[in-house]
Amino acid sequence: MSKRLIEVKDLSIQFRSERSWVTAVSRVSFHIGAGETVGLVGESGCGKSVSSLAIMGLLPDRRTCRAQGEILYEGRDLFSCDRESMRRIRGNRISMIFQEPMTCLNPVVPVGKQIAEAIRLHNRPDRREIDARVVSLLAMVGIPDPKGAAKRYPFELSGGMRQRVMIAMVMSCSPQLLIADEPTTALDVTIQAQILDLIRGMKEKSGAATLMITHDLGVIADICERVIIMYAGQVVEEAEKFELFDHPAHPYTAALLKSIPSLSNKGKKLYSIRGSVPSPGSIEKGCVFAPRCSLAKPRCLAERPELRDIAGGHLCRCWEVD
Ligand SMILES: Nc1ncnc2c1ncn2[C@@H]1O[C@H](COP(=O)(O)OP(=O)(O)O)[C@@H](O)[C@H]1O
Ligand SMILES: [Mg+2]
């Protein structure tokens, strides 16, 4: 097994509501090995983004948000890092791309200049070297006329092109861990495939470990080695990709797999899971998925199942699976 690059241990995250704290992420544990690609999958509102923001040290401030547990990066606890070391880790070691690049690109600065800034943060080559590097990065991520594109403002580029710019920025600092939070969700289907190819290519070239966050198991199919399924703030299943696709154990995973559009069910109405993700803290006892689960028994509504190993590293949180 590869060395553990990052290890999330018993991570819980609460947000302040009017009267109390509500738990959005509950005792989540997982690890990512050096160079490994892991998928983090679940419907919207399951706690995927806040978990990744915790890794990045970017959770909202303590008055509104608090976290417990440990996040170890090469054995070092990120929660006890001071702000400056965290900023350095974020710049050099762990990078993130988001669903909507506009949230992290500065709208009033040409994209080439923003990439140049990112390069300058990490090393200090001279101006000409930086300009050449900006153009080569833009070319590498498939932006036509990279020299001209460098002078453009983010709003002058399409969503797909902006995501390419973000990827160029990430590549400028060759991180050891890349977190991609729904990088293709906001894009057209044809562009989605191109961006995924680009991420895959970048990953292969740089050997960076990747946490690929998505609500779409279809995205996971050809990019990840291992998959973690999250539901309502908990990990409900974890397995190697092929094991998960061939033997999904948790009813939630099975339902997610059934809702992937495929050629074989073309023309039929697409399956969708009844109901919706509960709001944080609203299910106090029993399995968090029980209210939507077609297999739920009285015990499922009464007692909370633990995550347990059901077959050589295949983890599942369900009373009905043995
Ligand atoms: N800043 C915040 N303040 C209050 N609640 C939040 C905040 N950010 C996220 N949440 C809540 O935490 C839960 C998980 O959110 P999130 O991690 O964004 O889900 P996902 O990325 O899986 O769609 C949601 O119920 C969301 O409403
Ligand atoms: Mg999210």
Image (spheres, rainbow, N blue to C red):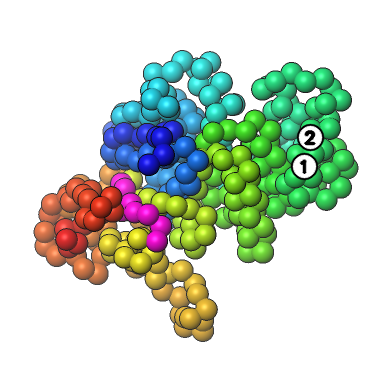
Q: Would you place residue 2 above or below residue 230 in this image?
A: above
- Residue under the image location 59 percent in, 51 percent down: 200
Name the residue beneath numbered marker 1. Answer: 138
Question: Which quadrant is home to the C terminus?
Answer: bottom left
In magenta segment, residue 12:
no
Callouts 1 and 2 close, C-beta under 8 Å: yes
Judged left or right of residue 152, residue 67 is: left
At horizontal 47% and vertical 80% (from top left) the residue drawn is: 265
Q: Which structural element holds mark 2?
A: helix
Residue 17 pos. (x, y %): 35, 36
Q: Say whether residue 301 is left or right of residue 180.
A: left
Q: Where is residue 52, by image quadrant?
A: top left
Image quarter hosting the N terminus: top left
Residue name at image x 39 percent, y 18 percent: 80
What residue does disc 2 label? 134
Q: Is residue 239 magenta?
A: yes
Amino acid at the residue labelled 2: Val
Amino acid at pointer 1: Leu
**Percent of width and height locating residue 10:** 29, 35
Element under disc 1:
helix
Residue segment shown in magenta: 234-242
Q: Residue furthest bottom?
A: 267
